[in-house]
Amino acid sequence: MRVLVSGGAGYIGSHTVLSLLSAGHDVVVVDDFSNSKPTVIGRLEALSGKRIPVHSLDLTDAEKTERVFAHEQVDAVIHFAGYKAVGESVIKPLEYYRNNLDSTFSLVNAMRAHGVTKFVFSSSATVYGEKAPVPYREDYEYLSSSSPYGQSKVMIERVLSDVAAVSEGWKVALLRYFNPVGAHASGEVGEDPQGVPNNLMPFVAQVAVGRRDHLTVHGADYPTADGTCERDYIHVMDLAEGHVAAVEHLDAMTEPARAYNLGTGTGTSVLELLHAFERAVGRELPYEIGPRRPGDLPAFWADATRANRELGWQATRSIDDMCADTWRWQSQNPQGFPDA
Ligand code: UD1
């Protein structure tokens, strides 16, 4: 297949490009580089030995988006592009709803105009809201999210399901990610957050490399084994392979749209992750216990049996693999991707 990857220069998008290419697919990347560096593309080309066509544009521009489909043959779309900072979304709700929804509308319209019917969407476990029983299962009906970022995922899942239901031949996979971490085993590609990282793993990695002086653990008084929050961390290469499995499965899907959890099915606490990272680095890392972060849930992880059964996919990489690969990337690229 020739797969258009929106947000293909970003963290999960770039790793998925590598997995698609090594599975024998072709890719077309669309990215506006608002939260990624163009130099990632050269790394992807060097690792894969293939030239990657790139269209640098903002997908909220419906005309420009349509023009990509007019010029490129596309069999399927994997849509990663979007704003994703939870805290920022609370402060700028309109920007988040507008950007995340409009870019999806542009893609869907261009696909309909050019007869493309296969869509894989980058959703999140945040759609399970605050009341879903753990482990999260895809058939939980009351999707909601406390942040505009998360609510944009809930809304887009609904838009795509409604469109697929009335569009001849459409197949949509809604992939609900748990906590993606890790990096490509080469250490050449990884997560490169701009500014202070919001998420745990990149923060720990920056402490290890000396860019931050210590980790603050956001709360150690949760009702969990060690008092810190538990999450289902999934290696980004397992996640990337989940996208390849999903895009290859679309034809066999019996429903127009279907959700799949992409997680490992096990929870790991903040302190367990920190200690695993210390093993990867070979030394202790400084941390302090701070207050809880508003909005954090104590513990959740995936029931990943649907993806396992229907997509024939399962996460295989361990927490130690996730830390070793993140450390290889971070230590080889302490400042992330170069500017040029
Ligand atoms: C967050 C988002 C989620 C989004 C996901 C994308 C929130 C509330 N949720 O998930 O919607 O889909 O990122 O990656 O922001 N922690 C620390 N110290 C730190 C950073 C994090 O102790 O400096 C803790 C957090 O309190 C949490 C755990 O580490 O318990 C994981 O945090 P994070 O990596 O931000 O992921 P989530 O909050 O699970």
Image (tube, rainbow, N blue to C red):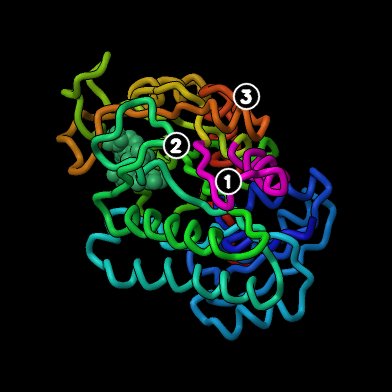
Residue 199 visible in rendering: no
Q: Is residue 152 magenta?
A: no
- Indicate the position of residue 149 as horizontal and vertical percent values: 34, 57
- Disc nearer the start of the sequence (1/3): 1
Residue 291, given in percent of the width and then of the height, sits at 15, 35
Secondary structure under the numbered disc 1 in the rendered image: loop
Classed neighbour count for the residue bearing mark 2: other residues with Cα under 10 Å, few (<14), some (14–19), many (≥20)? many
Horizontal and vertical percent position of residue 200: 37, 38
**Distance CA(mark 2)–CA(mark 3):** 21 Å
Q: Secondary structure at mark 2?
A: loop
Classed neighbour count for the residue bearing mark 3: other residues with Cα under 10 Å, few (<14), some (14–19), many (≥20): few
Q: Residues within 10 Å of mark 1 (few under 14, many from 20)?
A: many
The three-letter amino acid code for the residue at tag 2 is Glu
Camera-side residue of 118 and 328: 118
Give the label on residue 316, or none: 3
- Which circle, 2 or 1, is nearer the viewer? 2
Residue range in magenta is 239-261
Q: Residue furthest bottom?
A: 63
Vertical placement of residue 39 versus 313, above or below: below
Q: Is residue 223 left or right of residue 96?
A: left
Q: Amino acid at mark 3?
A: Thr
Pointer 2: what residue? 138
Q: Nearer the viewer, residue 227 or 132?
A: 132
Q: Identify the residue under disc 1.
A: 190
N-term-proximal mark, 2 vs 1: 2
Q: Do labels 2 and 3 touch, CB within 8 Å?
A: no
* Residue sitting at x 67%, y 60%: 169
State which mark lies toward you, 1 or 3. Answer: 3
Screen quadrant of the N terminus = bottom right
* Vertical comparison of 42 with 247: above or below: below
Does residue 326 sit above or below 254 in this rendering?
above
- Whichever of callouts 2 and 3 sits on the residue coming sooner in the sequence is 2
